[in-house]
Image: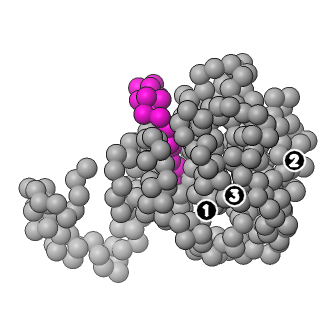
């Protein structure tokens, strides 16, 4: 990866041209278009593309890690079950046990109403410690409900007006209570509390137990004061390889930590898995 502070012909030329380009593009008339172009180029790289740009691509990536009949998947932050439903459709006739963790009572009722025979709905949140917490949301069933009040600009129009006391467990306790020795895929979408969910796995957070993990990183992490550096420090030493999920379902490997990974506009989807699994899925990706 070329870094702006490193020496090289490309950077030397760029530094010479930058003052002229800045004069042309960074002014009152062109600034809106420049910012739009900047945002779109980021989305092409998977940064900020996790807000509905390509749900099918995210699901397609998950299917690449499900290699056995009776596979086990945790959908943490299931909301109304859209991701789980998409996964079942993508897997066709493959038997897959999906455990949906969702604390919001309005969502739980909907999940129970349309529950698949191989799905278990668990009306709880996952975090670093078990107990009870307040869930904040702008409306019943809101996909932006969080254990933290949302103050990021992306959701300023969705001010939290509802609170609900919810039960909380940890990932380690959930795995043990369901007697799950190996989790094929863990999907986490909990509006900024993804790191807490992973921390709740304790010693079970390793690739031979939790084979693959998808998690969001973005504006919700401003509220929880967590950085991508925290995810890197937690997952990389335990043997996980990280990658960003691009629109279309391809994977862009994250080979080292660099500060431009701290991208808080909207949300970006990341994947963590054992290197051999990541390489296998990358070969099959479009």
Pick the residue in front: 109 or 225.
225
3D distance between C-alphas at marks 2 and 1: 23 Å
Give the residues drawn in magenta, as a range: 268-286
Label 2, label 3: how far apart the Cα atoms are: 23 Å
Q: Position of residue 12 (x, y in %)?
A: 9, 62
Q: Is mark 2 on a helix, strand or loop?
A: helix
**Label 3 to label 1, Cα distance in Å?**
11 Å
In the rendered image, which residue does mark 2 sit on?
Answer: 110
Which numbered disc, 2 or 1, marks the residue that appears first in the sequence?
2
* Quarter placement of the C terminus: top left
In terms of sequence position, does the residue under pointer 3 or pointer 1 come before the other? 3
**Secondary structure beneath disc 3?**
loop
* Residue 137 image point, x, y percent: 77, 67
The answer to if 219 sits in the magenta stretch is no
Q: Mark 3 points at which residue?
A: 127
Which circle, 3 or 1, is nearer the viewer? 3
Quarter of the view holding residue 68: top right
Give the residue drawn at x 39%, y 68%.
35
Q: Which numbered marker is on residue 192?
A: 1
Which secondary structure lies at badge 1? loop
Horizontal side of residue 180 vs 48, given as left or right: right
Q: Which-is-in-front pick, marks 2 and 3? A: 3
């Amino acid at each position: 990866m070329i870094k702006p502070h490193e020496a090289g012909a490309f950077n030397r030329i760029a530094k010479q041209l930058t003052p002229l380009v800045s004069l042309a593009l960074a002014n009152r008339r062109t600034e809106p278009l420049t910012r739009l172009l900047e945002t779109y180029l980021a989305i092409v790289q998977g940064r900020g593309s996790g807000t509905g740009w390509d749900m099918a691509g995210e699901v397609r990536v998950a299917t690449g890690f499900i290699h056995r009949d009776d596979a086990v998947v945790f959908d943490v932050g299931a909301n109304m079950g859209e991701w789980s439903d998409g996964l079942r459709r993508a897997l066709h006739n493959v038997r897959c046990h999906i455990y949906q963790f969702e604390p919001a009572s309005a969502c739980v009722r909907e999940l129970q109403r349309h529950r698949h025979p191989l799905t278990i709905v668990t009306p709880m949140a996952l975090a670093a410690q078990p107990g009870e917490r307040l869930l904040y949301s702008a409306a019943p069933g809101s996909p932006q409900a969080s254990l933290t009040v949302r103050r990021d600009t992306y959701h300023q129009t969705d001010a939290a007006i509802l609170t609900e006391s919810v039960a909380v467990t940890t990932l380690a306790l959930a795995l043990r209570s369901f007697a799950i020795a190996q989790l094929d895929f863990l999907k986490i979408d909990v509006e900024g509390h993804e790191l807490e969910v992973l921390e709740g796995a304790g010693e079970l957070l390793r690739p031979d137990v939790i084979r693959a993990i998808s998690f969001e990183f973005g504006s919700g992490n401003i509220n929880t004061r967590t950085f991508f550096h925290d995810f890197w420090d937690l997952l990389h030493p335990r043997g996980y390889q990280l990658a960003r999920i691009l629109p279309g379902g391809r994977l862009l490997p994250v080979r080292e930590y660099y500060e431009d990974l701290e991208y808080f506009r909207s949300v970006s989807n990341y994947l963590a898995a054992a290197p051999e699994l990541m390489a296998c899925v990358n070969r099959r990706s479009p």
